[in-house]
Structures are given as C-alpha cells and as structure tokens.
Image (cartoon, grey):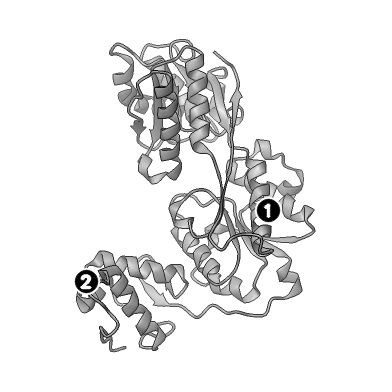
Amino acid sequence: MAILTVDNSSATSRDSSPARTEQQLRAWLERGVLKVGDRLPSERELALRLDVDRNSVRWAVAVLQREGLIRAQGPRTRVVAEPISQATVSPLMQNTVVVLGTVSGKEVSEADPAHLCWSDAIEVSAKRQITRLGLHYMSINPGRFDGRLPEDLACIRPGGIIVPELHRGAQDCIRSVLALSAAGISVSAYGGDPELACVDRVTSDHEKGAYDLTRWLIEHGRRRILMMWDGPAETDYWYAARRIGYERAMREAGCSPLPTLCTPPISRHLPPVRAGFIEESRKLVGHLIDYIVPEPTIDAIACLTDGVVYLMAQAIRLCGKEPGRDIALVGYDNYGQASPDRVFFPGVLAATVDKQYAPIGEELVRLLMDRIAGRLPEAPQCRVIPPQLVVIDGL
C-alpha cells in the first residue's frame, strides 16, 4: 500500500483547503506515490490525512477526474487512470467526428427532424451537416459509457466530438467528455449545463422563448399567468433563464409574477392509457387547487413542456374549470401535436416554442469546425440560437 506523506513546502497561507488538497493529490500522482490502477483512499481517509473537510476532498477529486487523471470505478471507488495517449492522428480519424447519440443510420437519412424528440433531432441535423461537409461520423451511445472511454477515444484521436445533449444523471458521460477536451480533442456540446462551461457550446435562448410566450398570452388578455415545472427546478439550468423571461414580460405589462408551481416529476404513459392519464392528472389537482379556487384565479398556465399540457388540462377540469376557455394552456418544445396524450384533449394547446433543433445541430458542427480550424479565441465559446414562437390553436 502506498505511503501517503503530506508535502506542505509549496503551500502558502493563502491556499484554500480545496486548492491545497488538489495540489497534494496531484503531487502524489506525479511522483508515482499513487500509481495507475491504485485505488484512491476514501473521502474520509483523505480528509483525515490532509486535515481538510470532505467537501475539499470531493472538489479536488472532481477536478482531477475532469482532467482524466482519476476515473470512477463504481459508485464509490476512484482509481488512478492511465495517461491519455497522444497518438498520431490517422487521416481517416482526422476527418471523423464522434457523435454521442443513438439515432440509426436509416433515421439519419430518412427522418424529418421536425418529428423527432429534441436530442434526436439535433443529432440527425448534426450528422447530416457532417456528411454535407464531406466528413465521416462515428456514433457512440452515451448510455454505454465506461471508465475507459476517454483513453479509447484518445488513442484513435477523432477530429472532434459532438454532444447533442446530456440528460440529468449523465455524470460519468460528462466527466468523460471533459477528460477528452482536456486531452486536446475539440468538443462541441448542446446545452447550458454549468459542468460543460469549459467546452464550446450551442444553446437555445430559453429566456427569449419564455418571454415571447408570456407576451403572447398577455396580448390575448391573460394577466394571471402561472409558470409550472415538475421536479426540483434548481436542477435544470434552463429553468432560471425561462423564469427571467417570464418575469420580465409580466413586469413590462404591469402584471405581478406568480410563484412557480413545482410539482413532483410527472410520469408519461406510452402508449396512452386513459386510466393512467386520469390517475396522473389527479396528482396535479392538489398542487393546482390553491391557484384556481381563491379569487382572483389564474387565467393561464405556461407548462414546462408540451407533453404536460394535456395532463394539466384534465387536472383543470377536475378542479371545475374549463381548460382553454377559463385557463389558457401553453407549452414548450413544439412536439404537442405528436404527444400521445393529445388524444384526450386535442385542441387545448394554444401555443408553444420551437427551439430550432435543426439549426442547433448544424451550428454545433460549424462551431466544432471553427475550433478545429483555429478561427476561435482560446476561451470556450457559447453560441445562442433564438427560438420561434409557434401558435397552434390560438385563443
């Protein structure tokens, strides 16, 4: 077992505990005190040995993981990773872009992005743009990531990596992407997740989308507009932007913003089952009733996404109001016409926002090509795509 001794010779009184912890871990790795394949001591052991709190250890380990120096091996175990190879790039791989996604080749050639879910639409658009440029793409399923992926990809040295979207809980995937970026492979990712702020990104202007949607409702006579979210809002980077847009539109019109209605995560049933639909909508009633029964009641709800609109319509009816007439319903993401639950309330979605998935996919590729060609500043770039308001049934 490695004997871990603390070297304080380079530390200063100004060093924070996290920084000091990172410096010491890095020194152990550089001197070979901790060798490739060695298991890292637990957070508790490291905190005691370094005389720091466990948050400092957690922060330092996360930094080294992002650099690919340490990798996860199971939920609680961290081991020293092999150095990422700086292998010679072959002409074939130099002209190959890795795309993290699951869309089949047939869908890429035949599917209409307008009829796909958002990450699939971005992926299809990006792959088509890569092909138009005369390049190759390699698909890798982000759900099948393992601890060796950064090393494996770094060995073949692809021209770049496109990340159409990383969902909640994809921490291992995010760490692998960051390790590849640290190894000098260009990465272009969709979204505003703070953990991806050190790579080039393309994102949708969520603030503008929510602003335009709220303004549209106000212009059609709705002034008591409730913003709705399922799950803990603070975990979604796009929530804060949408909330800013909503509040700005309300205040400009002299309306008072209402607190966000946060519900438990909503389940979707595929295919639609009426019994499940009714059961799920009843769960919303208890959260919604306080906004509907007291006067003045709300007159519109901005749902977090189109698929929730139909459940909300049923909950409104259970509360004794008529969806659409008494309380207008708008969504987001522009897939309401394809939502399975639409069969229960076919005409209730008044308007939505299209995030412009095809332009996002194309811009991801343009951004990556600009980075590879050296046309960008050294700092990571973020390009914002304006969304489009889509009026469906009107008011």
Q: Are the residues at dot 1 and dot 2 in contact (C-beta closer than 8 Å)?
A: no
User: As displayed, is residue 173 above or below residue 280?
Assistant: below
Instruction: Choose between 314 and 219: the one closer to the eye.
Output: 219
Q: Residue at x 38, y 46 (%)?
A: 235
In the picture, measured across the screen, residue 176 lies left or right of residue 153, that is left
User: Which residue in the protein does label 2 denote?
Assistant: 52
User: Which residue in the protein does label 1 denote?
Assistant: 366
Instruction: Choose between 236 and 2: the one closer to the eye.
Output: 236
In the picture, measured across the screen, residue 50 lies left or right of residue 245, that is left
Q: Quadrant of the N terminus?
A: bottom left
Q: Position of residue 245 (x, y in %)?
A: 45, 32
The residue type indicated by label 2 comes to Val
User: As displayed, is residue 52 above or below residue 341?
Assistant: below
Within 10 Å of the Cα at label 1, are there few (<14), some (14-19), or many (20+) other Cα atoms?
Answer: some
Instruction: Choose between 93 and 63: the one closer to the eye.
Output: 63
Res. 231 image quadrant: top left
The mark nearer the N terminus, 1 or 2, is 2
